């Protein structure tokens, strides 16, 4: 199954679970490398520490993508990642359902991965290479911003990576008790301070 097909299935599941309706256009939207590098350089979590802070890293980068750089049709995506066909985390669809039912999202932050899906099935992930580098599965020159993040089509990724979307969008974070509703409204709403101006 292609990445876009997996994304569509995750979007359908998300809507069935009443967590919002999402889609990404099938035509790719290329982001200029200077924007990607500028986005990377604004990150405050050191590269070697990102693997253990996926929510902070990738949600923060998604936020800047949406609020500072105004990139359209970006969708935060939750699920699992495999390397050479082997899943890296315990995340499954029932696992996400359980987090919703038990309001246990905050306690289960390390059990799934999140990233940004862009039009055309392009993936932007600022945490996975830190994890692979730490596990000896990828060589990364930390001095080069372009080597600290993954940006590529979901069906054509390096390091035998494959992303497996299970849910999409922001509503899961509130519905699972991961992020307080008022905090989410503040972050993603119009009241957010003009720090990116």
Image: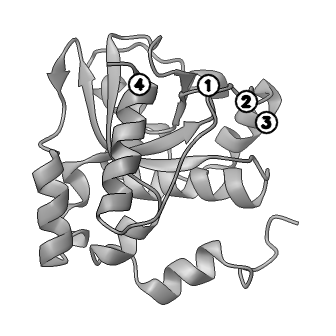
User: Could you classify mark 2 by the number of other residues whose Cα lies within 10 Å: few (under 14), some (14-19), or many (20 or more)?
Assistant: some
Task: Evaluate if marks 3 and 4 touch, with contact meaning CB atoms under 8 Å apart.
Answer: no
Task: Evaluate if marks 2 and 3 touch, with contact meaning CB atoms under 8 Å apart.
Answer: no
Earlier-in-chain disc, 3 versus 1: 3
Earlier-in-chain disc, 1 versus 2: 2
Task: Evaluate if marks 1 and 2 touch, with contact meaning CB atoms under 8 Å apart.
Answer: no
Q: Is residue 112 left or right of residue 42?
A: left
Earlier-in-chain disc, 2 versus 4: 4
| Number of marks in the rendered image | 4
Q: Position of residue 74 (x, y in %)?
A: 62, 46
Q: Which residue is mark 3?
A: 35
On-image quarter of the C terminus: bottom right
Q: Which residue is mark 2?
A: 29
Q: Residue at x 40, y 28 (%)?
A: 5
> In the image, which is nearer the foreground, mark 4 or mark 1?
4
- For residue 3, which numbered disc appears in the image? 4
> In the image, which is nearer the foreground, mark 2 or mark 3?
2
Q: Which residue is mark 1?
A: 143
- Residue at the extreme right of the image, as rendered: 197
> In the image, which is nearer the foreground, mark 3 or mark 4?
4
Q: Nearer the viewer, residue 147 or 70?
A: 70
Q: CA distance from mark 1 to mark 2?
A: 27 Å
Earlier-in-chain disc, 4 versus 1: 4
Q: CA distance from mark 3 to mark 4?
A: 24 Å
User: Could you classify mark 3 by the number of other residues whose Cα lies within 10 Å: few (under 14), some (14-19), or many (20 or more)?
Assistant: few
Q: CA distance from mark 2 to mark 4?
A: 16 Å
Local secondary structure at mark 4: helix
Earlier-in-chain disc, 2 versus 3: 2
Q: Is residue 15 above or below residue 80?
A: below
Q: Is residue 163 left or right of residue 86?
A: right
């Amino acid at each position: 199954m292609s990445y876009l097909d997996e994304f569509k299935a995750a979007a359908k599941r998300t809507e069935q679970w009443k967590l919002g309706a999402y889609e990404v256009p099938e035509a790719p939207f290329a982001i200029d490398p200077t924007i990607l590098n500028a986005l990377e350089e604004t990150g405050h979590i050191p590269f070697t520490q990102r693997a253990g802070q996926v929510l902070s890293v990738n949600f923060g980068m998604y936020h800047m993508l949406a609020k500072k750089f105004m990139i359209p049709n970006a969708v935060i995506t939750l699920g699992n990642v495999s390397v050479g066909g082997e899943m890296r985390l315990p995340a499954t669809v029932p696992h996400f359902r359980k987090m919703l039912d038990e309001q246990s999202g905050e306690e289960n932050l390390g059990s799934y991965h999140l990233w940004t899906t862009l039009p055309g099935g392009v993936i932007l992930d600022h945490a996975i290479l830190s994890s692979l580098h730490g596990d000896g599965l990828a060589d990364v020159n930390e001095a080069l911003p372009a080597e600290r993040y993954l940006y590529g089509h979901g069906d054509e990724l390096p390091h035998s990576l494959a992303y497996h979307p299970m849910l999409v969008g922001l509503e899961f974070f509130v519905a699972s008790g991961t992020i307080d509703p008022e905090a989410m409204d503040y972050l993603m709403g119009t009241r957010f301070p003009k720090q990116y101006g």
